[in-house]
Amino acid sequence: MQKLMGRKSTVGPAAHRGTSIEAGVEMGLFDPAASVEACQELAIARFNQLTALSGNPNVDKERAAIAPAVAIGLAELRQYGIPEAADGNRQHRIEVALPGVPVPFIGWLDFWFPEHGIIVDLKTQLRLSSKISDPHARQGAIYHAAHGNAEIRFAYVTPQKVGVYRLDDPRSHLARVVSIAQSIERFLSLSDDSAELTRSLSPDLDSFYWNDPAARQAAEEIWGPSPEGDAACLNAAH
């Protein structure tokens, strides 16, 4: 819908919560003298800015999670020291070409600690995961391909606790990345008609991707209205 049909949708307050917590943690990691309170204030100000025009009923709930999550994230990650900046940027840009994939993967590393040989990617949640999710593992595998000697860790931060997990066997996850990319390439090769390709898929409207009213409306305009409780088959339609 977004890439082929050009129909954009906005993100909800949960995404802005993640962006804001990361901003607060980032401030505290690169400036060890910064107080936790100052980092929390920056994070909340960022969230208020991003959600200023939002009418989403979950804004207050997501805002309440920010300050405790920043404190917990800083308490954990300040143990690693000060991350390395790259050419004035706090995040490191990566561009990775994988065999069998015609386009490069481009992204940004959250925190790179070269003295430890560790890359940490920050994820924020309201309930703590017990392990690295498959999509995050694939993301980490791409980071590993960019910095082959680095250990990849994911720090899942909630308002109550933090879990830091090491990515094991990145090569198997990277193989899955290549397989998915090649599947997308084969799908796109079936037609030059963006609308035909999009309508060949069926969206799972129960997914959080469709919580945005504008996205939901666009989906109904493209695929037609769906009865309540319709369990569709492909998240890839989004």
Image (spheres, rainbow, N blue to C red):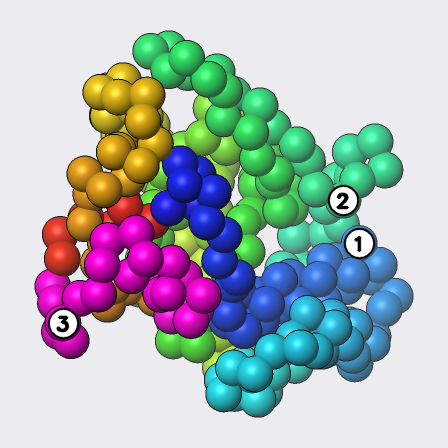
* Secondary structure of residue under mark 2: loop
Q: Are marks 1 and 2 in contact (CB under 8 Å)?
A: yes
- Structural crowding at the residue carrying mark 3, measured as other residues with C-alpha within 10 Å and reported as few (<14), some (14–19) or many (≥20): few
Residue tagged by mark 2?
90
Q: Are marks 3 and 2 in contact (CB under 8 Å)?
A: no
- In the picture, residue 51 is in which quadrant? bottom right
Residue that appears at 58% across and 71% down: 17
Residue tagged by mark 1?
30
Q: Position of residue 54 (x, y in %)?
A: 60, 78
> Which badge, 3 or 2, comes first in the chain's sequence?
2
Residue that appears at 22% across and 20% down: 190
Residue that appears at 22% across and 65% down: 225
> Which badge, 3 or 1, comes first in the chain's sequence?
1
Per the model, the C-alpha gap separating discs 1 and 2 is 8 Å
Relative to 72, is 28 above or below? above
Confirm whether residue 191 shows in the render.
Answer: yes
| Front residue of 96 and 16 | 16
- On the picture, is 191 further left or further right than 74? left
User: What amino acid is at disc 2?
Assistant: Arg
Residue that appears at 13% across and 52% down: 233
Part of the protein shown in magenta: 210-231
Q: Are marks 3 and 1 in contact (CB under 8 Å)?
A: no
- On the picture, is 115 further left or further right than 193? right
User: What amino acid is at disc 3?
Assistant: Pro
Residue tagged by mark 3?
227
User: What amino acid is at disc 1?
Assistant: Phe
Reply yes or no: does residue 211 show up in magenta.
yes
> Which badge, 1 or 2, comes first in the chain's sequence?
1
Per the model, the C-alpha gap separating discs 3 and 2 is 47 Å
